[in-house]
Amino acid sequence: MYTGESRWKALPDPINNGTVNFCLLEPADFPEHIYCSTIEIPYISNETGLPVSSSELTKALKFEDRIIDVLSAHGQLFVGHRTGNGRIIAVFYGNENCPHSVTVKAGLFGKRTFEINSVLDKEWTTYLDWFKRLDDINPIDLNEELKKEFRRQGDDLFKPRDVTFAFLFPRPEDRDTFLKSLRVKDINWTINDQWEYESPDLESGEAPSFWCTIDINTPIDGIEFDSMRIDLEQTAEQHQGEMDGWEAGHG
């Protein structure tokens, strides 16, 4: 995962109707490839196929916590999850592909294996090439040119991204530093404490977009906004409440 020091920069999102994503930009340190990995953790009854008690959901969340511990140790950044249809779908980003499965503890002596679905972020190379030009090109001009490039490459690229640049916040402290820097610049911001997500139909298989809202009263990089949306990672610490005392393992 990215660990180098970087500068902050505001970049208009070329895809999501002109909203803005904040990211750490240091193109020389950017990885060449990015993978998005998802893991499905069911919490339905095997016998009836129906949702079961809240205790089963709690158990599924504990499995998620153990998976986070294992994959975080292997350079994967947990960016959040969504629930629905009797399952939790956990989302990870990394610059290396995940293994096909992960095995964690189940009870005192047992283990359970979960399949991992990893896909290469096809847009990343295109973004990387254009980011390297940011110092020489006005971000708005770059934004328009990048739109044209995505249209030229095909409709599969010209679409909302799953979780935009979440992996560029390698530690919770880095995110906190960024938010503090906004205060120093007299930029007012508010965060949705629940880390809401925007999700397509669960059956589509696409990952959700985890987001919070920042209200801006001052221009950034010469661009004025009344408000903007930024995509940030949902930290693993937010899911550790029930994990104390448990040790994750992997096979």
Image (cartoon, rainbow, N blue to C red):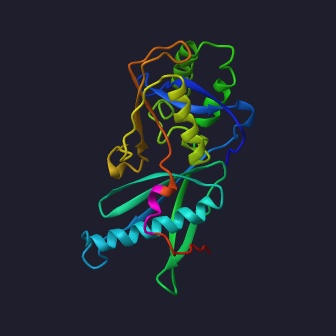
Residue 210, percent from left and from top: 42, 43
Kindly report the secondary structure that dominates the magenta region of the rendered protein.
loop
100 with respect to 108 (left or right) = right
Q: Which quarter shows the C terminus?
A: bottom right
Q: Which residues are magenta?
A: 238-242
**Considering only vertical position in the picture, is 172 above or below 164?**
below
Q: Is residue 186 magenta?
A: no
Q: Nearer the viewer, residue 88 or 219?
A: 219
**Considering only vertical position in the picture, is 212 above or below 8?**
below
Q: Nearer the viewer, residue 230 or 119?
A: 230
Residue 145, percent from left and from top: 56, 16
- Residue at 44 percent of width and 34 percent of height: 160
Determine if residue 43 is in view: no
50 with respect to 79 (left or right) = left
Q: Residue furthest right?
A: 28
**Considering only vertical position in the picture, is 132 above or below 85?**
above
- Residue at 56 percent of width and 30 percent of height: 181
Residue 88, percent from left and from top: 38, 61
Determine if residue 215 is in view: yes
**Considering only vertical position in the picture, is 23 above or below 121?**
above
232 with respect to 53 (left or right) = right
Residue 202, percent from left and from top: 34, 51
87 with respect to 143 (left or right) = left
Q: Locate residue 136: give its quadrant.
A: top right
